[in-house]
Image: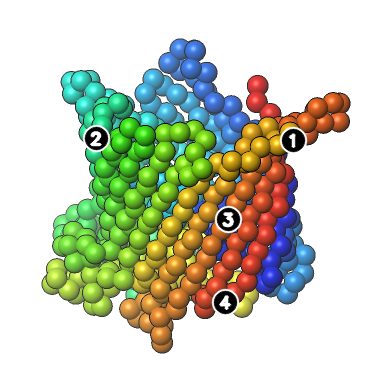
Amino acid sequence: MEAGTILSSTSKTPFWLRTNQYGSIPYNAPSATVKIGLSTDYDTTRAKVDIGYGVDLVVNGSTNVNFAPTQVALLQQAYVKVRFGILEAYVGRRRETFGLADTLLSSGSYSWSGNALPVPKIQIGIPYYKPIGFTKGWLSVMGTFAHGWMGGTYVRHSFLHQKSLFFRLGKTQSTFRAYSGINHNVVWGGISPELVGTGIVTSERLPASFQDYLLVVSGLRTGSQSVIPIGSNLTDFDLTNRIGNHLGSIDLALEVDLRTHSLFIYRQNPFDSGALFYLTSLSDGLNGIRLRSHAPNALVQTVLFEFLNTTSQGGPEFVIEDPQRRGKVNYFNNAQFRDGWAYQRQTIGTPFINPYYDVNGNTSFSGYTINNRLYAWHLAASGTLPIQARWLKQSPTYMTKLSLSRNLGTYDSPFPRPITQFSSLFQIAATIQSQGSIGAILDGTELIGRLAIDAGDLYPTGAGLYLGIRRSWVK
């Protein structure tokens, strides 16, 4: 259980107070929040089949654009999971991230960062790296396959197809471990009367047959009229592109054990409209390097640096007949699925590609974002502060994030001049140790403080503060 409040020098919550929080933090400030969660994990002492669940309810009170009080209740998590040996299946809404990156300090994986409210899904997969028998443990595999429900504003009742497949070369205790894999996401199907008359749909119902689903899963283009059944609602847009909005990343990583530290280097290569296949957008991607100490209470436990580049997009033009001119990828925007790569108007992928909102807080029918060409530099660190006191159960921990971005807009609508944005966060958390009847109630309670600052022209310049108290009960 957690309760807290956000105060801000502006009417907006600073970037790093709301980003990558699974959609739980309001955009407007001041605000107050209460979170209640209940979960159970697998019992590892039981047989190979077991069940678990999780429920998280978040209630926020904040102000809207007219400074009127609003209250929103969010079911951030609600899932049931079942384990069958090495396989796991779950149904519901669950907090997840996908991609090779540091899950705590990262600015966020390119395609699935944990920024938006979790998408309700049915998913089956191998959740942890499982050694392949005949390789004697040198090669391990991990992967997922899911069907989800996206909803949407401009395309309603759309679906999500998602899958991932990753391999690890090297045993758990090896000095060197190499990783590679792919994340593939598709928004498809749905109903959109607003798109009728644009020339990119033949009816308000977008392709959603079983044959269309097979094309969605395979990622293949229909290509030939011979495979299109009579009465199909496919358009030239579907034929020259693919069924649905496909995007994701191809990831590579190397982990090195340095005895006292571990070094993790990773690269996420984004794909969207085929430019990566022809290597015209190869300069785009998320690059990261992390150094982590094996000492459990080190002053500097983890240091991370990331660089994100999305400016190339294969060039300023899209010519399907010429692979070397197949650019203008337009990350997270799509001509059919104009809600963009977002769930409930929040970016699913890297939060540096931000949505564009009008004065009423709505996104535009013409496109989800007006800023997907950018450079971003991100530095983060975490550790344990050497502070001891009688009222502290253990030394307090800290985390800090510093991000600088240079934003160019889009190829179709470039900014008149590049926009520079700096956003920072500093967090400290301390657990109380108390004695006596009254103190026993507070014993084990965690106090949390976060200070965030925005400076630049992309978001309102100002500072924000989060003060929270959290308590966990474990049986």
Find the distance from the CA under tag 4 to the CA under tag 2. 49 Å
Q: Residue 426 carries which label?
A: 3
Question: Pointer 4 and pointer 2: residues touching (CB < 8 Å)?
Answer: no
Q: Earlier in the sequence, mark 1 or mark 4?
A: 4
Q: What residue sits 59% from the left and 27% below the top?
A: 40
Q: Which of marks 3 and 4 is nearer the N terminus?
A: 4
What residue would you read off at disc 2? 176
Quarter placement of the C terminus:
top right
The amino acid marked with disc number 2 is Phe
Find the distance from the CA under tag 3 to the CA under tag 2. 33 Å
- Res. 374 image quadrant: bottom left
Q: What residue sits 66% from the left and 41% below the top?
A: 430
> Is 450 or 3 nearer to us in this picture?
450
Q: Earlier in the sequence, mark 3 or mark 2?
A: 2
Q: Where is residue 314 in the image (x, y as percent from the top left)?
A: 23, 70
The amino acid marked with disc number 3 is Phe
Relative to residue 9, is residue 343 drawn left or right?
A: left
Q: Which mark is residue 358?
A: 4
Q: Position of residue 340 (x, y in %)?
A: 43, 64
Q: What residue sits 43% from the left and 57% below the top?
A: 379
Quarter placement of the N terminus:
top right
Relative to residue 73, is residue 287 drawn left or right?
A: left
Find the distance from the CA under tag 1 to the CA under tag 4. 48 Å
Question: Pointer 3 and pointer 1: residues touching (CB < 8 Å)?
Answer: no
Dot 3 falls on a residue whose secondary structure is strand
Find the distance from the CA under tag 3 to the CA under tag 1. 22 Å
What residue would you read off at disc 1? 391
Find the distance from the CA under tag 3 to the CA under tag 4. 30 Å
